[in-house]
Image (tube, rainbow, N blue to C red):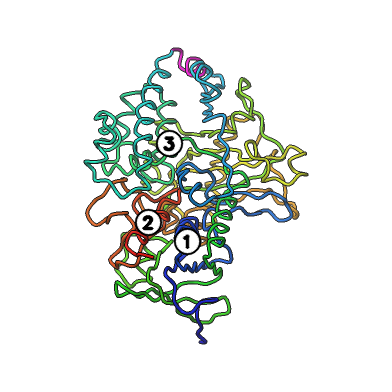
Amino acid sequence: MRTHQAPGSAGRYDAVVVGGGHNGLVAAAYLARAGRSVLVLERLAHTGGAAVSTRPFPGVDARLSRYSYLVSLLPKKIVEDLGLDLRLRPRGISSYTPTERDGRPTGLLVGGGEERTRAAFARLTGSDREWEAWRRFYGMTGQVARRVFPTLTEPLPTRADLRRRIDDEDAWRMLFEEPIGVAIERFFADDLVRGVVLTDALIGTFADAHDASLVQNRCFLYHVIGGGTGAWDVPVGGMGALTDALADAARAAGARIATGHEVVRVWSDGREAEVAYRTPDGADATVGARHVLVNASPEELAALTGRTPPEPAEGAQLKVNMLLTRLPRLRDTSVDPREAFSGTFHIAEGYEQLAAAHAQAAAGELPSAPPSEIYCHSLTDPSILGPGLAARGFHTLTLFGLHTPARLFARDNDAVRDELLKSTLAQLDAHLAEPLADCLATDAEGRPCIEAKTPLDLERDLRLPGGNIFHRPLSWPYAAEGTGRWGVETQHPNVLLCGAGAVRGGGVSGVPGHNAAMAVLAGQPA
């Protein structure tokens, strides 16, 4: 095979970033702005990783956030430091959860102002008890969010330091020491309300409310601390707008980005490193670096450096993208579909339903009532639709299914995907006044505009280990044995992990990229 040097290089950079996902681009932009020479090597033909906007349906002018889809954990500090051309819009409605009570369709709409939300709780439950419990519960988590979120871009605090910073022993116990199910059952009595709260502990995480490992607590924590408020915002232009802005910022600062270049090996003696990669034309090449920042999973890091791989990760979600000619009508006529779908639309996510779905999946069976949540990006940001589609009232729907671990798809991914999609949409249809199928748009070849991705599909498309969107179980946001000062350190002093599997990684945050860049700059004078 022919070999050559990295594109436009002299054979050595201050930093080589392996992977052009959003975290790698954040790291590259920070380092380049600090005057370091930076090369980003990305396997795919484009940057962005899982945070991309694509047109998945042939002949249809709609750019969907194909994989990741909302922004909560991205610190304003990163946006401002890098001067990103990025707009985020809040969702006016937090969530809507349809149900049936006393033989009539109803539901819980959270959002639109405090008084309206209070009235919605009273209408569903018959009193103000659950609303008052909701205010107390999220008052506690809000206080934690305001104190924990700023620490994500600082050196790791110790556990004791973080506990002192939170300064609320009840909140500490609820979130950090006992299964989240204990607090949910203590605060709330209504099954549907309990389920709505629990969902934030289960998105992308296969666990029960009372799992002794507290993996569900860690997931819950990261879902409620974003921005110090827990609010989930819509990126204008889709997720690709974020990663395009990051790539632009990195290039503007002087970083070189080479797509279609797959890294196959990383060598390091602790002071100098060498990165071997393959070019789009099949040639082998190497480049030297003072630091290597790996924007990939811990499993991929181990493979690149010849280390023992970590325990295998496993994802547990179904991602479905849809384009509709119109929003479907609801059986609950008291709610406008434009409001119900603009927030998170919970399906089959009552507390007991979630427990039953987890138990079935843990036993190796598909949940009989698959839980999922849906939202409509185009209600908040119609720019992702071509002018013709927007004028005709078209809309997108994004569905995220829970409790579907990768192991369930091992026997026949295609067949199980089809079966799960059918039963998931049936749960949605039970709350609609018309079948969702009647609202689906068709592509240029006459096929319904709907695509589903299982954990195995995500592993194949994006190399997410086991399809796990966090790369591995989320970590506590404090120092533990072996985590290092920033949570990005590895066994090689000059090789850093800047992907979602780093401490305080997971979600679309840029935090591991920021922290890896800070670790380099702290130990490497200009």
Q: Pointer 1 and pointer 3: residues touching (CB < 8 Å)?
A: no
Q: Earlier in the sequence, mark 1 or mark 2?
A: 1
Q: CA distance from mark 1 to mark 3?
A: 34 Å
Number of numbered discs overlaid on the protein picture: 3
**Distance from label 1 to label 2 (Cα)?**
11 Å
- Give the labeled residue for mark 3: 199
Q: Is residue 252 above or below residue 170?
A: below
Q: For the view shown, which residue lies furthest in the front direction?
A: 526
Could you say which disc has been placed on residue 518 in the image? 2
Q: Give, as a single range, the part of the protein colored magenta.
A: 120-127
| Mark whose residue sits in front, 1 or 3 | 1
> Who is closer to the viewer here, 12 or 471?
12
Query: Is residue 307 visible in the rendered structure shown here?
Result: yes
In the image, is 157 to the left or to the right of 462? Answer: left
Q: Label for residue 28?
A: 1
Q: Amino acid at mark 1?
A: Ala
Q: Residue at x 55, y 69 (%)?
A: 258
Horizontal arrangement in the rendering, residue 280 relative to residue 385 (left or right): left
The amino acid at mark 2 is Met
Which residue appears farthest toward the bottom when viewing the image?
1
Which of the two labelled residues, at mark 3 and mark 2, occupies the earlier sequence position? 3
Q: Pinpoint residue 242: horizontal percent, then vertical percent.
A: 56, 50
